Image (cartoon, rainbow, N blue to C red):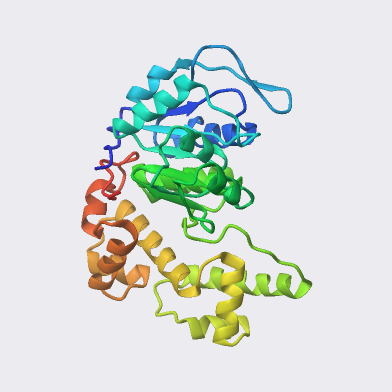
Amino acid sequence: MEPAAPAAHTPYKVALVAFPGIRAFDVSVITEIWGTDRTDRDAPAFDLRRAAADRTPVPLRGGLTLQPDRALGWLDGADLVVVPGLDDHLTPAPAPVLTALRRAHARGTPLAALCGGAFTLAQAGLLDGRRATTHWNLIDLLRAEHPRVTVVPDALYVEDDSVWTSAGTAAGIDLCLHLVRRAHGAEAAATIARSMVTAPFRTGNQAQFIEHPTPRADRDADALAAVREHALRHLHEPLTVAELAARAGMSPRGFARHFTAATGTTPLNWLLDQRVAAAQRLLERTDLPMPEVARRAGFGSEVTMRQHFAARLATSPRAYRAAFNAGSGTGGSSPIAR
């Protein structure tokens, strides 16, 4: 069972695991999401700490340093532990770090690794027999170095037994926002995403590597972006792939092919993901009855909405509303099963 999010007056404790070799970019992502006070915009209160084996400043690439402010024992009371990626992906983590990570997982604390941080979790044995991903350029290396890991090559982020791993760079932002969404709700994640001027919702099963090699592909991408914007403004309507394809000036088959190449997911899956996200926001912000939430999100019926919540979130709309009721700020216990 996933640990409950803390009460509104208790900051959510996040441990950034620090040791020589971690990437400055990932440290910045973690700090921007959990280390910035946005409570004036009704975002949750976070308590981000940099935990290390000792208080020695940790050197980062580019002449930067990171000053730890907690010992590794702080992981024992954290709500979430996050491991940055590595500049050299085979950098051995200090033995106390590996021990602390194993202890945190044994306590049931969710662990998340960004990019090459998957190698650190693998060193700790925490990915043995589990599904995991990393940057597309490191997939073969992860397989070779840690053959007991079930490597998922084409995903933005993956979870297995409360152990999260992500692809590189921007996918780390996606994972961090997703973890906020799970613990605190869609509105909290959207507030942080707006502050960062980044997309608030990309599902983990989207493709990592997308190419736009020609001007024609760029023109298609512009048309597809316009179609996605139209769909988001008309989610309450019974949209079909054929109608969206016609709006883009493409055949349904060509539209589906170009859409998947541009976004990493099919038009239908993208539309369903957006409708689930819209329903989440309505359940958090309003007291509308379930049939009206389903209508406004474009599901047509409460039964259909309930089926898609079960498939995507492993919970029901009513359980989601009970946990993330409107105006709660940080929300209650996460209803989303592992």
Residue 243 pos. (x, y %): 50, 84
Query: For the view shown, which residue lies furthest in the top direction?
Result: 55
Residue at x 34%, y 61% (from the top left corner) = 312
Q: Taking 244 as reference, is 224 left or right?
A: right
Residue at x 23%, y 64% (from the top left corner) = 290
Q: Is residue 234 above or below residue 138?
A: below
Res 256 → quadrant: bottom right
Residue at x 73%, y 23% (from the top left corner) = 63
Q: Taking 149 as reference, is 117 left or right?
A: right
Q: Nearer the viewer, residue 338 or 198?
A: 338
Q: Is residue 269 above or below residue 86?
A: below
Q: Nearer the viewer, residue 36 or 100?
A: 100
Q: On the rendered image, what quadrant is the N terminus found in?
A: top left
Residue 292 pos. (x, y %): 27, 68
Q: Is residue 148 visible?
A: yes
Residue 302 pos. (x, y %): 24, 70
Residue at x 29%, y 65% (from the top left corner) = 293
Q: Is residue 48 visible?
A: no
Q: Taking 212 as reference, is 11 left or right?
A: left
Q: Nearer the viewer, residue 187 or 130?
A: 130
